[in-house]
Image (cartoon, rainbow, N blue to C red):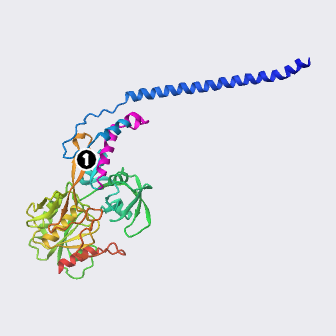
Amino acid sequence: MLAFSLFKCVTIPHIMNIKKFRLALIILIIFFLGSYIGYKIGTYKVSLDWQNFHINAINKTPPTSTSNIDFSPMWDVLNKIEENYYDKSALDPQKLVNGAISGMVQSLGDPYTVYLPPVQNSSFKQTLAGQFSGIGAELGMKNNDIVVIAPLDGSPAEKSGIKAGDVINKVDNQPTTGWTLDQAVNKIRGPKGTQVLIGVIHKGETKEVDLSITRDIITVKSVEGWVKKIPDITGVKINGYSQDQIAYVRLSQFGDSTNQDWLSLINKLNQQIAGNPNFKGVVLDLRNNPGGYLTDAQFVASEFIKDGVIVREDSGNGEEQTLSVSRHGLLTDVPVVVLINRGTASAAEITAGALRDRRGAELIGENSFGKGIVQEADDLKELGTGAGLHITIAKWLTPNGTWVGNGKNGVGLKPDISVALDPKDPTHDTQLERAIEELLK
């Protein structure tokens, strides 16, 4: 009895523990079995997906080249990505091509030699056509910084207080360190009415300022001007000379319509200039002109220069080419002075340098930007995507052989007469005032 009773007291709890153990074991087996089956199904599906996914390189024919380049590492990397990369949705063949081309171009270390995917290439063309949606600031690279070459007249950028020489430090709170010029432009531009937050370090300062700017449609009128009597000119303070007149021509960029707009304006002004005994000369205002087409600079400079060289090109192979006067100008015999500042760049510097070297025109204002290199812009039609490629093909020099630099360490054109704007009175254009005074001498 005692033994039996003891047996019952021991075995009943023991049997209950065995049942609990068996239940837990069954649950555990079911869990691992389900996980294993799910894993096998998932990996089998991935395997099938990889079998169905393949990047088909339709053309591996090497181009004609004098360089011996082994492309096998690139094909090897492409194959490894295709075989092993886990996120197949990211394997967009066109993105891979764009990334490869961009990396190849960026390896040159030249911020002006760039590959432009379709969207960026379209934006660039819109800029030269004179209309785009953004804040209206021409950007450049200097010392690896994104800098403002020039805010466009009346643009949201200008109204917000952005000036030539400012550094764009952040865009929508993202640091621009390491960005290319195209990345900055792509981030800053956007639909009309949307806002972008720009972190700016104004020239000569160290503290960053946040500016919230509303994007707008930017329409650039590249040429404007007038003939006025001295007392009627806004922004200058010159006493006397009540009957004397000067012509003022403002050239804001060298774009698609510049030549046509230039001819239209100059023909109109020339009717007021010709035979006018009170006319004293022309002020050509190239301040904040970021440049554009080289041939447009040749066209504009030819208005003031009778013959000979406008600009020299050094392609780096020991050969030098020259662009000379291309037409008969109407202003070759009139006195001319040129206004420049740190926003005067590229084709604008070519024009200013030519007028100083060939006409003895005085440059008045501040040092120019210093972009002394020339790019060739190509649409990559063979890709069929609308992409473009800008390649630096030469550096340019003024007729007398002056090189202004390449934008990284460019010294720019030094003015003959240095004049700063009046920081206390922005309505007083001290640079234009000094230019007029030189014409009146």
Q: Nearer the viewer, residue 313 or 197?
A: 313
In front of the other: 178 or 273? 178
Q: Quadrant of the C terminus?
A: bottom left
Q: Position of residue 204 (x, y in %)?
A: 38, 70
Amino acid type indicated by mark 1: Gly
Q: Which residues are magenta?
A: 81-109
Residue 221 quadrant:
bottom left
Picture quarter with the N terminus: top right
State the image quarter where residue 285 is shown.
bottom left
Locate residue 276, reporting x and y percent: 11, 74
Say which residue appears at 41% left-offset and 54% top-offset: 195
67 inside magenta stretch: no
User: Which residue is pictured at 64% across the width and 26% down the height?
Assistant: 28
Q: Position of residue 190 (x, y in %)?
A: 36, 50
In this image, 192 relative to 42: left or right?
left
Left or right relative to 350: residue 73: right
Residue positioned 37% across, 63% down in the render: 167
Helix, strand, or loop for circle 1?
Answer: strand
Residue 396: where, in percent of width, then height? Answer: 19, 62
Q: Which residue is mark 1?
A: 388
Q: Residue at x 49, y 25 (%)?
A: 41
Q: Residue furthest bottom?
A: 240
Q: Say whether residue 94 is magenta.
A: yes
Q: Residue furthest right?
A: 1
